[in-house]
Amino acid sequence: MQASGSGQPGPEEVERELRRTLYRFDCPDAHTLGEYHLDLLEEQDRVQVAGHAAECDECRTELQTLRSFLASPIGAPESMVDRARRVVATLFVPAPGRAHAALRGAADSATRVFEAGDVTVTVGPGQVRGSLFGLVVAVADRPESLDGRVVRLVPREGLPLAATLDDLGNFEVVGLEPGLYALEIDLPDGIVVVEELRVD
Amino acid sequence: MRFLRGDHRDDAFCFEIFQRAVVHHDDDAWEAIVAQYRGIVLAYVGQHTVAAMLHEPDDYWVNRAFQRFWTAVGADRFGQFPDLPALLKYLKLCVHSVLMDEVRARKATTLTPLEELPESLPSQVNAEHGVVGKIAGEQLWAAISHELQGEAEERVIYLSFARDMKPADIVARYPRLFANVSDVYRIKRNVLERLRRSAAIRAFLPT
């Protein structure tokens, strides 16, 4: 701290030090406030914090922030194995195939080819509205190893629809409502995910 | 360990890992928890309204949140958490509390609106100084209280420095003590001048 000419600190220095040392010196710390909110404090501490919070605007604001924060959804745990195995497929090239409005990826063409490592996933609209055809080619796997593997269409809201691969890697999902879906394919070495498919 | 084999989304396995880490001080279990929940804690940090204002890497908060959890939850307290959601909620509280500790520490150095928080703390300030800072505050306030004359002075100094209230807010809260903001400014100026000359107060100030 700088002293004034008389050896006394200047007014601004005193003010700064008071702010630094006194700011919320008698407030419960943020963690204690949080434990109060979660009802984890002993009775004596709980009463003390409640009394303080009743007359402290800063603590009430902090509690409100905590309430909002805790109210936001807690993510579901996902196993390490799942995380390690999930591979997001990226759009490889829009096939120049049929013009069809039922299914859209990143571009307008109806059929899409996605790649994830040595796995190629081709998806396109089925014969009837609300259906989806696909072909999965995994270079590292024998075709018959794909037989019976599960394919899931996971909507942003609601329950997923599932289908299985045949021995050539084909699948078909029917009964899809319009909307955005994620496509998940359980393969021997992990889960390949196409994160966004729009079904109109 | 079934959890590590990937028998996933069964809360009982995850809860068991927490139990081993906390109650039995199993380092492997603790490492598994950090590996398993690091992503979730990272998401918590991203959700919090103040994280972006503090300009620190998210990983910094993730590490501090896990440290806070580890420090706060011992074997003696594990019984307070009946299931995995309760533990995860507490982990989320740890994210909140380490962030708010930092906000408080930075506000103490500037007392500016949250949006204008400094990007880092001055080197002499440590957001984890908690108990020491609290004691220092109590001692300084006790010394200041001896220098104050009457309720109006006490309200002005306490609300200005301990609660960061603006003069207009002080007047609004205590209209019987203050006719207008000029009253508050005058009292504050007079008291600061008195404190500046006080040997007892100077003893608290850095030389």
Image (cartoon, helix red, strand yellow):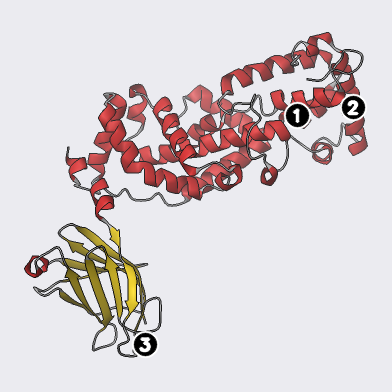
Q: Chain of mark 1?
A: B
From the image, state whether disc 3 or disc 1 is nearer to you. Answer: 3
- Residue in the picture at 17% in, 62% down: A187
Q: Nearer the viewer, residue A86 or A127?
A: A86
Residue B207: x percent and y percent? 76, 14
Residue B139: x percent and y percent? 69, 14
Residue B111: x percent and y percent? 73, 36
The answer, for residue A54, to whether it is visible in the render is: no
Residue pointed to by mark 3: A101
- Residue in the picture at 18% in, 76% down: A171
Query: Total marks drawn?
Result: 3
- Residue in the picture at 52% in, 34% down: B98
Task: Assess whether mark 2 and mark 3 are in contact (beta carbons under 8 angstroms).
Answer: no
Residue B29: x percent and y percent? 27, 32
Tag shown at residue B197: none
A168 lies left or right of A136? left
Give the alpha-carbon distance from disc 3 to disc 1, as whole Å: 64 Å
A10 lies left or right of B76? right
From the image, state whether disc 3 or disc 2 is nearer to you. Answer: 3
Amino acid identity at mark 2: Arg
Labels 3 and 2 share a subunit: no
A144 lies left or right of B133? left
Tag shown at residue B189: 2
Residue pointed to by mark 1: B161
Labels 1 and 2 share a subunit: yes
Circle 2 Cα neighbour tier, 10 Å, few/some/many (<14 / 14–19 / ≥20) = some
Name the secondary structure under disc 2: helix
Q: Nearer the viewer, residue A117 or A33?
A: A117
